[in-house]
Image (tube, rainbow, N blue to C red):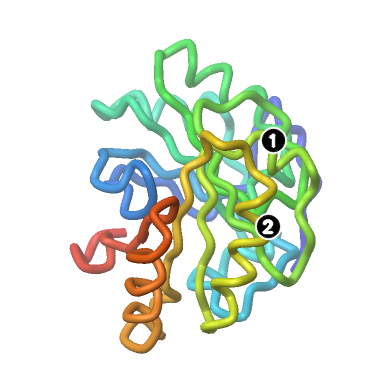
Amino acid sequence: MKIKAVNADQGLPIMEHFFTIQGEGTYSGRAAYFVRLAGCDIGCVWCDVKESWDSELHPILGIDYLVSEIEKTTVDFVVITGGEPALYDLTFLIKKLKILKIDVAIETSGCYELKGIVDWYCFSPKKFKAPCKEAYQLANELKIVINHASDIAWAEKHAEKVKPSCKLYLQPEWSKSDSLLPLIIEFVKSNNKWRISLQTHKFMHIP
């Protein structure tokens, strides 16, 4: 899992970028342009984009080029994801997007302090590396991937640390949905603060 050193005001290592529909969490169903940064040192065993982990396998794309590609669409919402996007200084990319009046969200494990100001901070902590304190303060959305029944109790511990306005989501790991979703449904029916997030883009067969 190699992390490439970059001059972030000029470019970032990008695995892929594409115009699609957000499939998860609060903004599920909203048109969104995804920018997937390459590079991650978390190593989730169930990660469905392991090819994003090694940043040296992916090109550095210029910020101006990336923004120009986004500007070709009708989008007003950009999701910066990964990999682990908070490994990089996102200030320059976000500033250029805000000039275009585009809302910016990040999907992060919270392991690194965020460089840049986003409109929506989706915090998805992982057991493999502890998040920083900032993540709990910034989180607009706490999204816990449930890979085992015991993860629900683990999710509750994180929910105790975020601000009261933070939206709480439990999301079954895709390959185990059949067995885990019934457990999550029963838990949410008894715990009104939680909602269920599904990877609806996979049902729609879109990226």
Q: Nearer the viewer, mark 2 or mark 1?
A: 1
Classify the position of the C terminus by image quarter: bottom left
Q: List the single residue furthest toward the bottom.
A: 179
Say which of 180 and 31 sits in front.
Answer: 180
Q: Which mark is residue 137?
A: 1
User: In the drawing, does residue 132 fall left or right of residue 82?
Assistant: right
Whole-percent x and y of residue 11? Answer: 64, 34
Query: Considering only order in the chain, which callout, 1 or 2, is on the residue closer to the N terminus?
Result: 2
How many neighbours does mark 2 have within 10 angstroms: few (below 14), some (14-19), or many (20 or more)?
many
Q: Is residue 66 above or below residue 100?
A: below
Whole-percent x and y of residue 100? Answer: 41, 14
Classify the position of the N terminus by image quarter: bottom right
Cβ atoms at labels 2 and 1 below 8 Å apart: no
Quadrant of the rendered structure where residue 202 is? bottom left
Q: List the single residue furthest toward the top.
A: 99
Quadrant of the rendered structure where residue 129 is? bottom right
Counting every numbered tag in the picture gives 2
Cα distance between the residues tagged 2 and 1: 24 Å
Quadrant of the rendered structure where residue 34 is? top left
For label 2, the residue is 39
Q: Is residue 171 above or below residue 109?
A: below
Q: Name the residue at 62% across, 80% down.
A: 45
Q: Secondary structure at mark 2?
A: loop
User: In the drawing, does residue 201 fall left or right of residue 54?
Assistant: left
Whole-percent x and y of residue 75? Answer: 29, 29
Q: Name the residue at 50% across, 33% down.
A: 120
Q: Name the residue at 52% across, 34% down.
A: 165
Q: Secondary structure at mark 1?
A: helix
Say which of 105 and 171 sits in front.
Answer: 171
| Residue type for callout 2 | Gly
